[in-house]
Structure formats: C-alpha cells, structure tokens
Amino acid sequence: MIKFESVSKIYKGDFVALENIDLEIQKGEFVSIVGHSGSGKSTLLKLIYGEEMVTEGEVYFDENQLSKIKRSDLPKHRRMIGMVFQDFKLLPKKTVFENVAYALEVAGVSNEEIQENVTQILDIVGLANKMDKYPNQLSGGEQQKVAIARALVHTPMVIIADEPTGNLDPVSSLEIVQLLIRINELGTTIILASHDRDVVDKANKRVIVLENGRIIADHAKGKYKIA
C-alpha cells in the first residue's frame, strides 16, 4: 500500500533528514515509527502525506508515484489519509459534532449524510454522549478522540497519528492506543509515530526504528530496543 524505494530527503543547507529508506507498509497493518527527536519521523510522514517531496528515490501510495501527482490532485490524495496530531487542532467555537462534521460540510456532503456519518463515528470513538460539548469542556483524552473521529469521518485508507499521546496522561494515552487498535481491526491502516516507549509497547505491533534518518531496525511485533 505504501512503499519507499531508496528514498532520501535533503533540506537546504545539505541537511539530510532521510537517507536511503526502503520500506513497505501493507494494507491493514498497524506500524509504529519510533526514534529520537530529529531521527526523521516527521519527514517520513510528510512524504506520505505529500507535504514534502523526495530528493531521491520514490514514494508510492496505493501504487501511485507521489512525485508525479499534480498539485491540483494533492487534496484528493490527502483525503485518503486521516491526520492526528499532538495538539488536537480542534475548532474551539464549534461543538464536538460540528468539529467532526466540518470537513464533510466543506466537501459538500448532504446534511442527512453528515448527521448519519458523524453520529456513527462519534459512537465508534465513545463520544456519542458528548456531541454537544465544546472542546474546553472535554479532557485532553476526549479532545484527542474528537481529533481521531475527525480523521475517520472521510473513511480514509490510512490514519497517520503523529505523537498523538504527547500531551496526555498515561491513562488517556492507553485509551488512545486502544482506540487506534480498534480502528485498525476495522480495516484502517494505522501509522503511529511516537517517542514514548510505553505507548509503542502497549500497541504491540510492528515497530520501525529510525536513527539519523536511517532505518536501523524493523521489528515484526512487540518491544523494541533503542539507545
């Protein structure tokens, strides 16, 4: 589903963010990407999302070469990917329901479909009883669940979660990992980027370790080792 072939990304000033990356992620996989700050995790995710382009090599998404995607087609590509960030990025003056519905409204989806889809997604993430609440009335864990619901509402092929538990306490972090596992079991590919060993261990899935822009380990399942 996602394939990196001899990918390198070099920024201005000859800063090498990724070097000679070969990687395949299959449809329906749950993959954790780990590594210290500056290891290349964020750059790797940006290449998948189309926010950055490779310097060398090629990234394929669903058999499409991302380097050949026209700028006008990038929104279509990105709709196949749900993004979840550390800082939630919720709209403070909109309710839980409105935050999740907003992306569908922009896409021109009918009110009837929005009502049905958003209600269903909020039920999946366990927030059906809080759809009329505002972000400041929710805990951090609940806000992140809203962000995940928003990422899910377009029924993406992949959800990329970039440090999704970075601002959460251990209990909320565990709930978010369990929710991502549940979504994965429903068929959505999950890519989880994290520096939190406990979060990755709790996921207990494939682990790819980055260091200085290179893959230094690819564990099929379970705990990983990194200095």
Image: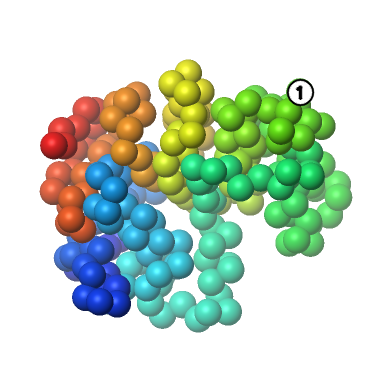
Image quadrant in which you'd find residue 35: top left
Q: Amino acid type of disc 1?
A: Asn
Residue under the point 41% across and 80% down: 68
Nearer to us in this view, 38 or 204: 38
Residue 32 is situated, as x and y percent measured from the top left of the image, at: 32, 40
Can you say which quadrant of the picture contains the C terminus? top left
Mark 1 Cα shell of 10 Å, populated few (<14), some (14-19), many (≥20): few
Residue under the point 73% across and 28% down: 137
Whether residue 87 is visible to the viewer of this picture, yes or no, is: yes
Nearer to us in this view, 75 or 90: 90
Residue 66 is situated, as x and y percent measured from the top left of the image, at: 40, 72
Whether residue 188 is visible to the viewer of this picture, yes or no, is: no
Image quadrant in which you'd find residue 3: bottom left
Is residue 5 positioned above or below 207 on the image?
A: below
In this rendering, would 2 be left or right of 182? left
Is residue 190 positioned above or below 224 on the image?
A: below
Residue 41 is situated, as x and y percent measured from the top left of the image, at: 31, 52
Residue under the point 21% across and 44% down: 209
Nearer to us in this view, 171 or 23: 171
Can you say which quadrant of the picture contains the N terminus? bottom left
In this rendering, would 14 be left or right of 41? left
Q: Secondary structure at mark 1?
A: helix
Residue under pointer 1: 129
